[in-house]
Amino acid sequence: MKKRSISKYLISFCSFIMTLAIVSAAGAVSDAYKENIYNPGVLKPIDSKVKVKVGQKAPDFTLPAVAGGKIALSQYRGKKNVVLSFVPAAWTPVCSDQWPGYNIVRDMFDAHDAILLGITVDSIPTLFSWTNQMGKLWFPVLSDFWPHGKVAKQYGILRSDGVSERAIFVIDKKGIIRYIDVNDINQRPSLEALIAALGKLK
Amino acid sequence: MVKVKYGISIMLMLMILLGGSIGWTASLPVVGGVLPDLSPGFSLPKPKDGVVIIEIFSMYCPYCQREAPNVNKLYEKIQANPNLKSKMRLVGIGVGNSNYEVDVFKKKYSVTFPLYSDGDFKIHKKLGEPRTPYFIGVKINSDGSHRIFYSKLGEFGDVDAFLAEMIRLSVIK
């Protein structure tokens, strides 16, 4: 009887270690966020079906910005190329270390006459607290919180659990989608590929 | 009882298989210990009776960005000191950063000391997945062996104080 309970403990311990090993497969996290990052573990890479295509007109939207006011995609028509960076959720590992990288390459966006719009399905107060840890961002951060994930759904990147995919859309000055990268949610999209896509815009 | 034994065996086999496929996460570098083998991504420089300071950073980490000018100053001070120049090396490992991203960081902050890329997080895992920035001080012994004398998370703050601490803790001559 005693041997059996030791065996049960051993099985539980093994299962625990296996779970830890799986959950640990996440990216590096900046100390900027201290112990405040929630690790959801490894998720299904893609959990939606994109509804837009390269060459198609990008669906317009208007969303509230963390800095105040509202921003419409159409306001950049004829003026700026636009990069939409959807990240799944505030206070999670990969998302927290994505926009701070874009924050130091403004010159690369400027070189291609592009504005970056960061979007999540989180509320404005959550985004306010989270992006404050990143330093001063040069690009607007928009909340697709209510109606929940409406824009993500329009683009076909709303996952079944209510967060968006980790996705990038490059839209030219005519409002036409020129590049789509619906990335594995567990990994950061390639910066090199994004900049190369911007380089192809006229 | 036999079933339980089979259960344990299967569980252990699964652990070994999973461990091999996803890579077990090691513990953080310990003072007094040695670094794991970080090849092929990184080979520890071996200045005789010298010191290697390793910064674990990421181009995407706001604190690493903020710390970059300080780390540059540290390198300048090492280079400007004839006594330290040949004995103290400073290197950076960009965890989760491709060569392209490491290059972006290098250009953005005019980094002149060697930076290495760890795009697939293999080195990061071997080092126990530290948050960034993370600094490791390694003393190289005359026989080529080494010992970790410093292992700490976060920005180091005052450059002169940090350099003095590196000299004191490593007992570099």
Image: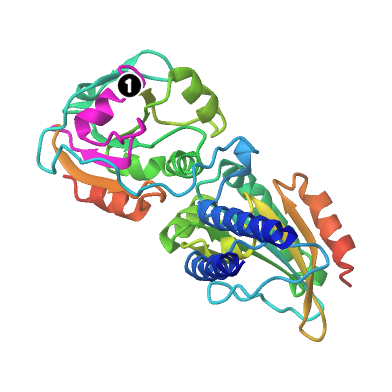
Q: Position of residue A193 (x, y in %)?
A: 30, 54
Q: Is residue A149 above or below residue B121?
A: above
Residue extent of the magenta highlight: A145-174
Residue A60 picture location, percent across and down? 18, 24
The residue tagged 1 is A148
Q: Is residue A80 found inside the magenta-colored segment of the image?
A: no
Q: Nearer the viewer, residue A104 or A84?
A: A84
Q: Residue A180, located in which quarter of the rendered image?
A: top left
> What amino acid type is highlighted by mark number 1?
His
The chain to which mark 1 is attached is A
The image quarter in which residue B135 lies: bottom right
Image position of B31 (left or right of A171): right
Q: In the rendering, at what x and y percent does residue A110 appear?
A: 33, 39
Q: Residue at x 46, y 62 (%)?
A: B119
Which image quarter holds the N terminus of chain B? bottom right
* Quarter of the figure with the C terminus of chain B: bottom right
Main SS, magenta region, reads loop
**Residue found 82% across the figure and 84% down from its top:** B142
Query: Horizontally, is A187 left or right of B9 in the view?
Result: left
**Above or below B12: residue A129:** above
- Residue A161 is one of the magenta-drawn residues: yes
Seen from the viewer's position, the closer of residues A56 and B75 is A56
